[in-house]
Amino acid sequence: MPSEYPYLIDQYQRMHTSLRVSVTDACNIRCRYCMPEKVHGFLPRDRLLDFESIARVVSVLGRAGIEKVRLTGGEPLMRPDLPRLVGMLSRIVSIRQLAMTTNGMMLAESIDALVASGLTHVNISLDTLREKGFQQISRRDGLEQVLSGIAAAVRSPLQVRLNALVLRGINLEDVIPLVRFAREQGVVIRFIEFMPLDADRAWSESQVVSGEELRGIVEQEFGELRPVVSADLSQPSRDFQFPDGKGGIGFIDPVSQPFCRDCNRLRLTADGKFRNCLFGRQEWDVRGPVMRGASDAEIHRIAMDCVHAKFASHGISDRGFSPPERAMYQIGG
């Protein structure tokens, strides 16, 4: 589709076609790789970008090449009336994929409305199948709610993926059970390396279980995995098939094998700031200009300024690297 505005291309010739929209920083669990155990207040409602403004920003960026939108948080289903936003975004003609990442705890009760509103994909976090392990990681109860959400998603027409994050010493033992569960459900599971984005600043490389190590563990149980060649170079996951062709598995390795070279993602925080990288330290305010009546061209210019300032890589391995001031839940996963 021809672009009404210049494409969002950075100085390294990466064209941005994917937008991650955080709708809230609030969450109903406290995963140790993302949030502090105690949160002293989430963003008040009047600080959140309202649905009309989100839809307007997405519409403008859609006319500059954005094709995929993923709703994130916090937990996106903590945002009241979320299906209404999904419906608004699904009516933007340039958007061909509308996805959501969720912890699944509120999904069963919301799935019908989300599907009816136009959601196409859902990624559900599942780090363990043990209640004790779930409590240790999330610092809350709720595994059965997550499993109910997964069951509802699998029954729906949505494309479903499971996301798992493995912490050494906490849930490495869960890898094989998680893979078996995903295969039984007929869905792809993807393992994501632990990144230095936790609110407690407790990240250490010693806790990171690399994708290569996880792949070795999986292959010992299921046999040699067959690589799946993706036509989309910006896809962060290295995907594989099992020898028996049942199900699929992927590894997202931002620490051990960064995929920055082909990154096509732009981010919009819940309080209306553009970010060009999870690990970036700079933000571009779009909420203020929108509230003051900015034109579509001005919104596009702010996005272009953000994209043009993007670095070649996130720099996790660089000497002197320090994580951003905001934690994952405040940026949007």
Image (cartoon, helix red, strand yellow):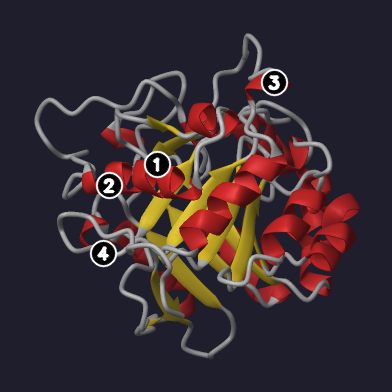
Q: Secondary structure at mark 3?
A: helix
The residue indicated by pointer 2 is 255
The residue indicated by pointer 1 is 194
Q: Secondary structure at mark 4?
A: helix
- Residue 46, which numbered label? 3
- Residue depicted at x 64% and y 50%: 55
Label 4 or label 2, whichever lies nearer to me, is: 4
Label 4 or label 1, whichever lies nearer to me, is: 4
Q: Amino acid at mark 4?
A: Asp
Q: CA distance from mark 4 to mark 1?
A: 21 Å
The residue indicated by pointer 4 is 262
- Residue 293, which numbered label? none
Q: Rate crowding at label 4 as few (under 14), some (14 to 19) or many (20 or more) other CA atoms within 10 Å.
A: some
First in residue order: circle 4 vs circle 1 = 1
Judge whether residue 257 can be spotted in this image: no
Q: CA distance from mark 3 to mark 4?
A: 36 Å
In the rendered image, residue 296, in percent from the top left (x then y), is placed at 49, 49
| Disc 2 and disc 1 in contact, CB within 8 angstroms | yes
| Disc 3 and disc 1 in contact, CB within 8 angstroms | no
First in residue order: circle 3 vs circle 4 = 3
The relative height of residue 156 versus residue 58 in the rendered view (above or below) is below
Q: Rate crowding at label 1 as few (under 14), some (14 to 19) or many (20 or more) other CA atoms within 10 Å.
A: many
First in residue order: circle 3 vs circle 1 = 3
In the rendered image, residue 193, in percent from the top left (x then y), is placed at 38, 48
Q: Nearer the viewer, residue 306 or 165?
A: 306
Q: CA distance from mark 2 to mark 1?
A: 8 Å
Q: Nearer the viewer, residue 7 or 11?
A: 7
Residue located farthest toward the top when viewing the structure as drawn: 40
Q: Secondary structure at mark 1?
A: loop
